[in-house]
Amino acid sequence: MMNIPLNIVSTVHDWLFSIMPEGVATVTEWIIVAALYLALFAVIGLYLVLLERKVAAWFQLRLGPNRVGPWGIFQTIADALKLVSKEIYNPARVDGFLFKIAPYFVIVGALISMSVFPFSKQFQAFDINIGIFFLFSVSSIGVIGILLGGWASNNKFALIGAMRSGLQTISYELSVGLSLLTMVLLAGSLQLSEIIEVQRTGGWLILQGHIPAIIAFMIFMIAGTAETNRAPFDLVEAESELGAGFHTEYSGMQFAYFFLAEFINMFIISSIAVVLFFGGWLSPFGITEGITWFPEFLWFFIKVLIIIFLMMWFRWTFPRLRVDQLLTLEWKYLLPLNLVNLVIMAVVIWLNWTF
Amino acid sequence: MKNEDLQNIINGLAENLAFSEEGSEFLNVTIPKEALHNVCSQLKSNSDLDFDYAYCITGMDWGEELGVIYHLESTKLKHKIVVKVMTDDRENPTLDSVWDIWRTAEFHELEVYDFFGVKFNNHPGLRRLFLTPDWDGWPLRKDYVDEANMIVK
Amino acid sequence: MTDQKVKTKMKTEEYFVNMGPQHPAAHGVLRLLLTIDGEIIKNVEPDLGYIHRSIEKMCERDSYQQIVHLTDRMDYLSSHINNEAVCLTVEKGLEIEVSDRVKVIRTIIGELTRLASHQLWWGVMGMDLGALTTYFYAFRDRELINDIFEETCGARLTMNYFVPGGLMYDIHPNFVKRTKEFIAHFKTKLPEYDRLLTGNVIFEKRTKGVGMLTKEDAIAFGATGPVARGSGFASDIRKKDPYSAYDKVDFKEALFTEGDSYARYKVRIMEMWESMSIIDQLIDNIPEGNIKEPTKAVIKLPKGEFYQRVETARGELGVYINSTGTKNPYRVKFRSPGFSNLSVLNHISKGVKIADLVATMASFDFVIPDIDR
Amino acid sequence: MSYFSDIYNGIKTLLTGMSVTGGYFIRARKGSITQQYPDNRDTLKMFDRFRGEVVMPHDDHNEHHCTGCQKCEIACPNGSIEIVWDRQVDPETGKKKKMIDKHIYHLSMCTMCGLCIEACPTDAIVWAQNYENSVYDRALLTKVLNQPGSKVKAGIED
């Protein structure tokens, strides 16, 4: 059931059904929604890039982009235009078809998982009852894109980068899944809007679940940053070792897809954290419950930006991990902690010590 | 240890070694080319010489002879000497390599080969280190002429 | 037939990768031909000469003042100390004794250069291991030293300020004030470097036990400077045979014995503290005296060989001048620290991952013009 | 046991690292050290000993101190100074005297080492402090230091 806010929806809905036969109307409606999400996707991607560059600059005693537009607002739009006008160059002995397909895998993976998020009560494109499970499975499509890109560009450094990314994402999906599982145990349902309903009455899940929830949140943040190949785990495109990793040979819009997909993945990981730990679009302790004019999705974006700032803070402070340390961190530390945490959460719920 | 007693210890290692101290603050030992390897290994292994640190290995073109100058120091006994070895055959100068005595010689001898053309037998990988493999001539020799990039004032 | 099929198990081939002249971790134009099996390095073979200007050949046609200016371009991060090396060798040849004022100023400026070089090393080491913010903090502090040099010598990187016989001109009136301000500022910032990188658990895991170098190998391969002092080889020329005003200053030699990249890191951090304490001891009482001993316009060294060793930020720089009494030297040889330190790299990075090679090279602090000359 | 202790102090060291960068983030407003070069052009002043470019100062009678003795040309390590001189009759003494015709200075080859200025007996050439020396055409880098129609100041002997 697609529920889109603002009363214009019903008018558009009736107008479509009136002038077109049944089937065609629903398809055009899907296309409109898809176009809306694509625009949202592009805007979020561009402004996250600008936010990252500004935040990085403030960390590093710099000013960040300030030449294109006031405070550099149009900087990433200028970047996007530059990338669009750049020639898409396919180097010689490159596996043509795979080389071209790889970026689309990454973009599609990111775009699909954006559709499930409840930005506000009505503003959710796809409210399926296996929400978290769907998100979790879609996030592994991106890896195939990176592996294809690394392999197809016939460049030794890209191949090493791609192998590392495969290794990293597969092992860290485990702890992402398990930490999500701990929280779903507490929330009781996989449907995202259901999870938010649970938090409307009992307060945020991170408060309800107190200690095991905080541990789950920390593990999720570590594994989430690893999932998006960022911060201390950015071995995939480690500048000082592999140059630009798997997207060395890409240029123009293909590079833009990889680059944008990384930021959208960051957005996805933080919105999962917001929905599951910090009560989605619910205002903290219900302060704006009564006020109707205050748009609920604003709370969602404020919380997401805070989590994104945290991930940026990781990136600009920590050195990079080595490949084998990455695996020991996952298999020897995160996984056992996760399992123990799952048991603790189960015991807490069974004895209903939750707040 | 004073230069004199250094001198008579080293004198015992092989015959017709030439010692001199003029023009340099260290004791200079000139070794004939055949005896280079065994004298140097004794310089290192002999307990009261114990030259374990070859800190500077220089290629040298004295006009007619080509050769190598080794500055050696003992880290424990804190004394230094300069060993010189020459070969007067300019077409195919060969000396024996001392890389198995001091591992740093491996790279320094490559540099001497690259600029002076002195071949070192039983050197692990004699190759041109700095210049491109197809460079002809030995740049640091006195008789090297290259109109293109040598601006002689 | 079947057992033959069993025997052909999966065969992995080694392949060559160019950690080539154009590579972020190469700090310049150093090309390393890596033989890799998967991610394990089998052999590291450096191919040098990309920035080889044959400084030794140029010296044979230059006068002695002109040689000094060439050494700026060798190890550009310790350019003052390189100039000082050639000046000391020429002064040793002419038997000139420079005044105390020149000796103290040369020591202070030498220590400032060492600080600037270690700061840049610290920033770039963080960057090589992935923490990009360290670069900017290190350069903020390094700019203050560059301003001191720019005000006194007029240039920021290739200063030609020391001349055989003393200094080109006297230090700027507010040189002392600026240096004191810098020391006060940096004494608060260096602990911050420790908090940001030294204690960091990821940094420790990336550098502890990586690039092990034993003391015997350090001596055998002729490794010097912080690389050798990280494995216990006391190679500090300022202690072994002190030059300029180093005998009048007391400072500890930074010596650690673990021999891994973390030990080399600790050596340089301790050396920064020692340099600051040396400057503190000298900055307040710079003696009076003339700043340039009279030398003839055309310097002619007497016939003979002269050798002088100096401790640059990277290790022991030796200048060997063989002169036949004419105005140009007969042969000049620069024993550069980077060249011998590079020869150790292949020995200690067999069977190591690429990321470890990058961490080891960052702790070796290569400057490629110093290797290629 | 050590398993939990190294998790604990691992996180503690990570947090101290973050506190350093966090501190800079909070003080970002005044802490930035970026020099906005094209905007601060007029206020940007170089130190007075800055080695920008070699110039020959002329006083108001269009006279300079260069006698054409070529000491700077000899002192220059990479031949970036060429002196073109010719013998002219000196008006007062009537004898043939060496007069400077053109003092050519190749800024493209100069390595700013300062040996020429130190070698000049009559302090004819000094450092200028300009730092915008880049040009589009290489020929512009070959400069003639003595202005046309200028001559040596009276009484300057090398």
Image (spheres, coloured by chain):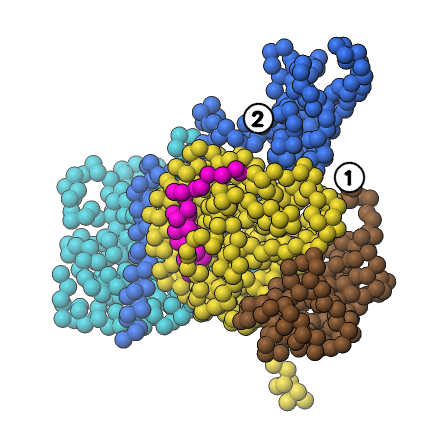
The chain ID associated with circle 2 is: D
Up-down relation of residue B67 to residue A84 (above or below) = below
Using the image as rendered, state which of residue D76 and residue C209 is in the foreground.
Answer: D76
Q: Is residue D62 left or right of residue A241?
A: right
Q: Name the residue under label 1.
A: B153
Using the image as rendered, state which of residue C98 and residue A86 is in the foreground.
Answer: C98
Q: Looking at the colours in the rendered structure, which chain would you say is drawn in brown?
A: B
Q: What residue type is labelled 2?
A: Ala
Q: How far apart are marks 1 and 2 (CA)?
A: 28 Å
Determine contact: label 1, label 2, CB under 8 Å.
no
- The local secondary structure at tag 2 comes to strand
Q: Looking at the colours in the rendered structure, which chain would you say is drawn in cyan?
A: A
Q: Name the residue under label 2.
A: D128
Q: What residue type is labelled 1?
A: Lys
Res A123 visible? no
The chain ID associated with circle 1 is: B
Q: In this view, does A4 lie to the left or right of D155?
A: left
Task: Determine the colour of chain C.
Answer: yellow
Circle count = 2
Using the image as rendered, state which of residue A24 and residue D6 is in the foreground.
Answer: D6
User: Magenta includes C282?
Assistant: yes
Q: Residue at x 14, y 67 (%)?
A: A352
Where residue C164 is drawn, which disc sits there?
Answer: none
- The local secondary structure at tag 1 comes to loop
Residue C278 lies, in percent from the top left, at: 42, 51
Q: Looking at the colours in the rendered structure, which chain would you say is drawn in blue?
A: D
Answer yes or no: are tags 1 and 2 on the same subunit: no
Looking at the rendering, the stretch of residues picked out in magenta corresponds to C266-291
Q: Residue at x 66, y 65 (%)?
A: B27
